[in-house]
Image (cartoon, rainbow, N blue to C red):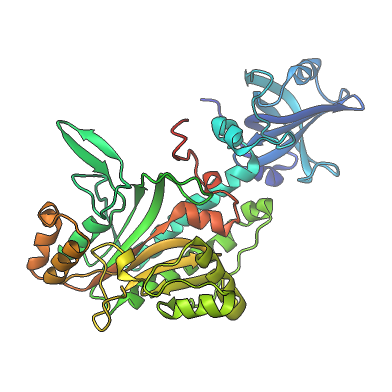
Amino acid sequence: MIKRTHYTNELKKAIGKDIKIVGWVHDSRVLGGINFLLLRDNKGIVQITAPKAKVSSDVLKICQKLHQEDVIAVKGKVVKSKIAKTGIEIIPSKIEVISQAHVPLPLDPRGVTKANLDTRLEWRVLDLRVPENLAIFKIQAKIAEWFEEYLRKEGYLQVFTPCLIGGISEGGADVFPVVYFEKQAFLRQDPQLHRELLILAGFDKIFDLGPSWRAELSHTPRHLCEHRGCAVELAFIKDETDTMRVEEELIIYALKKVKKECEEELKLLGKEIKIPRTPFPELRFPKIYEVLEKEFDKKIPYGEDYDRESEKLLGEYVKRKYKSDFFFVNRFPFKAKPFYVMRVDEDPRWARSVDLIFKGVEQSSGGQREHRYEKIIQQLKEKQMNVESMRWFTEHFKYGTISMGGFNLGIERFTMQLLDVSNIREAVLFPRTPERMLP
């Protein structure tokens, strides 16, 4: 194992000391007879300065042969610098070449030569070496960590629900079939139904961090075939508004943490985190029809779901009226929602179904679940689903049921909107889309 004494972000505390660092040659150049290298590790970039008068001939020979993305180990002394961006530089006493990169590179991790998104995804390993791209995923990892931290503090139990299921859980054809021994199985669309069964088992408050799949032939900047979510479920709720309060507190907790503990990454990306006020604004059907027509002259047939344009327009409306990037949409038309959603008993056209919108893009879907056995069976029939094939799920609702609700908050979409990333594929390490399964 090649041992280092420091990462690049630790060097300011090592001025005057002899150190050893390891990383990639981000750039190299010769100015006025002085060799300059920029060495990059996953903590940052530091300048290596090799003046002829201060370094050995062996060091100079190696510097002159180095190319971008060669991997090197550098021993030397950390000194203050008026020229280097970080205010420090390393005067090398020894440079060891660990590996040499082939030239020319298929992609420039410095970002000097721009590449289109397809090329970037094709050469994703090189693309992820770009410091700004690394910053996105450092923040994303922290978001997931802080979601988990908040939920654990609030008494939620982490569970692991199956990714392979023996039937279609939500109806429709947007599923990936897989061969399961001699049978056909499917990749889950959502861990929804198994979370409900765990609530029935008495688990009370749970969360599940994991992947889901949808076989949608969507090529929009916000769709993926495989995505990850933080799925939360809780028991004994009054109604769907209880799930909304949990979700907004979860988000506020994570945003405060990002703002405080990801300062370097946010600075690199040029982003500032604003903590929204709670409770988040809430818009409900059928009032939404009136808002869209009155404010934007957009008419949606009564009882129908809205479209993507409407979602964006409602985001503009909430931003203008409530000064908020976050808001909930509640009471969707039941005809547009899955069978397990609870309807409003007083007016069954509407469902206790909630979406969270952030900067005009849906982040989560959730709300209150139907827990009454007779109602579940009725709604399965109404959705023209096979009642017998869903017995594995529905039969448990005969034996002591409780009110329940929850949501599934998309990790990649939340990252995308928080950091104003233009395409969700840039917020996924290795995105899976209709046209891409590799790398």
Residue 220 at x, y percent in the picture: 51, 49
Number of on-image labels: 0
**Which residue: 64% across, 42% down?**
131
**Which residue: 68% across, 50% down?**
268
Say above or below: 181 vs 224. Answer: above
Can residue 206 be seen in the rendering of this structure? yes
Residue 47 at x, y percent in the picture: 76, 36
Can residue 17 be seen in the rendering of this structure? no
Foreground residue among 193 and 345: 345
Say above or below: 132 vs 410. Answer: above
Residue 357 at x, y percent in the picture: 48, 66
Residue 145 falls in which quadrant of the image?
Answer: bottom left
Foreground residue among 145 and 12: 145
* Residue reaching furthest to the right: 32
Say above or below: 28 vs 394. Answer: above
**Which residue: 68% across, 47% down?**
13
Residue 174 at x, y percent in the picture: 33, 47
* Residue reaching furthest to the left: 399
Apparent side of residue 346 relative to residue 75 in the rendered image (left or right): left
Apparent side of residue 259 relative to residue 339 in the rendered image (left or right): right
Foreground residue among 435 and 367: 435
**Which residue: 34% across, 58% down?**
231
